[in-house]
Image (spheres, grey):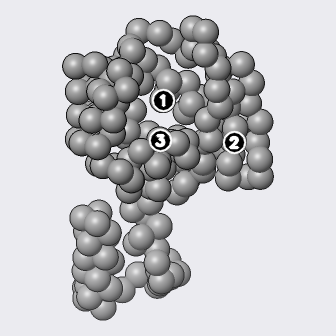
Amino acid sequence: MRKTIIAVGALGLALLTAGCGNEDTTKPTTSAAPGAASAEAKADKPQEPKTVEAAKALAQKEYDTYAAGDWKGAWDLWTKEGKAAITRDEYARLHTECKTITGLTFEITGARLEGEDKAVVNFKRSIAAGMSEIRYEDGQWRYQPDAESMADYAKGVDKVIAEGQASGRCQK
């Protein structure tokens, strides 16, 4: 937002001062297209390629961050939908109060694109295996939490922790 304001302010200043001083007729003048300032602000983030390799790279980064116990760092790699389901702090609290196994790394065993904005990445971790959905949003690949996790987040962290403690799945 701040960069957009600065870009719009700079554009306005350039337009106001364009008529002042010496006129240089050797250079053609052009006006900025509507939305140019917001396009400049979005240019800060490089566009990732829409390839299976780029999606796998994001998945591996998510898995490595999660395995290291960096809950907030893992959340930072999520889709907008995932982030809307649980806050960064609540996600970290969930995994801190309901101890999650760390240190066991994930190995990607396969991946495929399903359209140009979605990838499916298969993994194994110790004796478990699974799959993750990776989505392309705003020029970046992002991790989408699975449906079961999203349903848990909708219950609220306190309830998920209480259910986990009652079932023995979650220990402090």
Dot 1: element: helix
Residue farthest to the bottom? 19
- What is the quadrant of the C terminus in the image? top left
131, 78: nearer the viewer: 131
Dot 2: element: strand
**Residue at coordinates 50% horizontally, 24% vertically from top-left?**
63
Of marks 2 and 1, which one's residue comes earlier in the chain?
A: 1
Q: Which residue is mark 2?
A: 119
**Residue at coordinates 65% horizontally, 31% vertically from top-left?**
131
Q: Which residue is mark 1?
A: 62
- Asked whether residue 118 is in view, the answer is yes
| Amino acid, disc 2 | Ala
**Residue at coordinates 24% horizontally, 42% vertically from top-left?**
158
The quarter of the displayed image where residue 93 is located: top left
Q: Is residue 5 left or right of residue 64?
A: left
- What is the quadrant of the N terminus in the image? bottom left
Q: Is residue 81 left or right of residue 141?
A: left
Count of number-bearing discs: 3
Of marks 1 and 3, which one's residue comes earlier in the chain?
A: 1
- Asked whether residue 90 is in view, the answer is no
Q: Residues within 10 Å of mark 1 (few under 14, many from 20)?
A: many
Mark 3 and mark 2: Cα distance apart in space:
18 Å
Residue 72 on image: x %, y %? 30, 34
Residue 91 on image: x %, y %? 31, 38
Q: Which residue is mark 3?
A: 149
Q: Residues within 10 Å of mark 2 (few under 14, many from 20)?
A: many
